[in-house]
Image (tube, grey):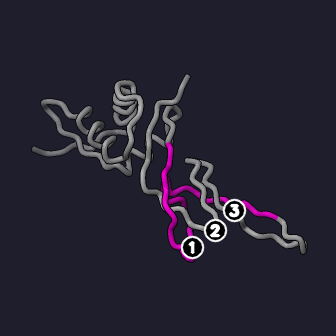
């Protein structure tokens, strides 16, 4: 049996269906299972990755994403957001000598942030936003 790739609209409809039923999904892998099951029909089987589901969820306006993380390597430089691959903006502060220092990095797309101690995403929790 072959797999089909669903459109973003099909994924969004499945997200609404799944989150209306379960309200909260505690991990990306569990959401992936539920979405794939929701998309499958007798004629077609669909395959979609957890990463793609997460990105569609982030870009939708009806899903809230909670990011759990652990400490990572502070020497590692981040060039893009590890959650959505968006642009990280530097948040700076003035020193007492008049210079500037970067105190954290923030992603305006998904809400990820990290400071001196780099935060590595470990788990995502998905909710349907309240209307």
Which badge, 2 or 3, comes first in the chain's sequence?
Answer: 3
Q: Which mark is residue 74?
A: 1
- At label 1, counting other C-alpha atoms closer than 10 Å, the crowd grade (few under 14, some 14-19, many 20 or more) is few
Is 83 situated left or right of 40 in this image? right
Residue located beneath label 2 in the image: 116
Is 17 inside the magenta-drawn segment? no
Name the spot of residue 118 as percent of width and height, x first: 56, 66
Is 25 situated left or right of 101 in this image? left
> Which one is nearer the viewer's eye here, 32 or 43?
32
Is 81 inside the magenta-drawn segment? yes
Name the spot of residue 100 as percent of width and height, x first: 81, 70
Give the alpha-carbon distance from disc 1 to disc 2, as whole Å.
6 Å
- At label 3, counting other C-alpha atoms closer than 10 Å, the crowd grade (few under 14, some 14-19, many 20 or more) is some
**Foreground mark, 3 or 1?**
1
In the structure shown, which secondary structural element does the residue marked by tag 2 occupy? loop
Which badge, 3 or 1, comes first in the chain's sequence?
Answer: 1
């Amino acid at each position: 049996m072959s797999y089909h790739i669903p459109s973003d609209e099909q994924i969004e409809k499945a997200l609404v269906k799944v989150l209306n039923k379960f309200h909260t999904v505690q991990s990306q892998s569990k959401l992936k299972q539920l979405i794939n099951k929701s998309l499958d029909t007798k004629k077609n089987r669909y395959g979609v990755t957890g990463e793609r589901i997460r990105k569609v969820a982030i870009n939708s306006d009806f899903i809230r994403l909670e990011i759990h993380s652990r400490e990572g390597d502070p020497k590692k430089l981040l060039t893009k957001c590890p959650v959505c691959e968006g642009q990280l903006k530097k948040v700076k502060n003035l020193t007492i000598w008049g210079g500037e220092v970067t105190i954290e990095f923030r992603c305006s797309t998904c809400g990820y942030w990290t400071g001196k101690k780099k935060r590595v995403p470990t788990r995502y929790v998905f909710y349907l936003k309240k209307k």
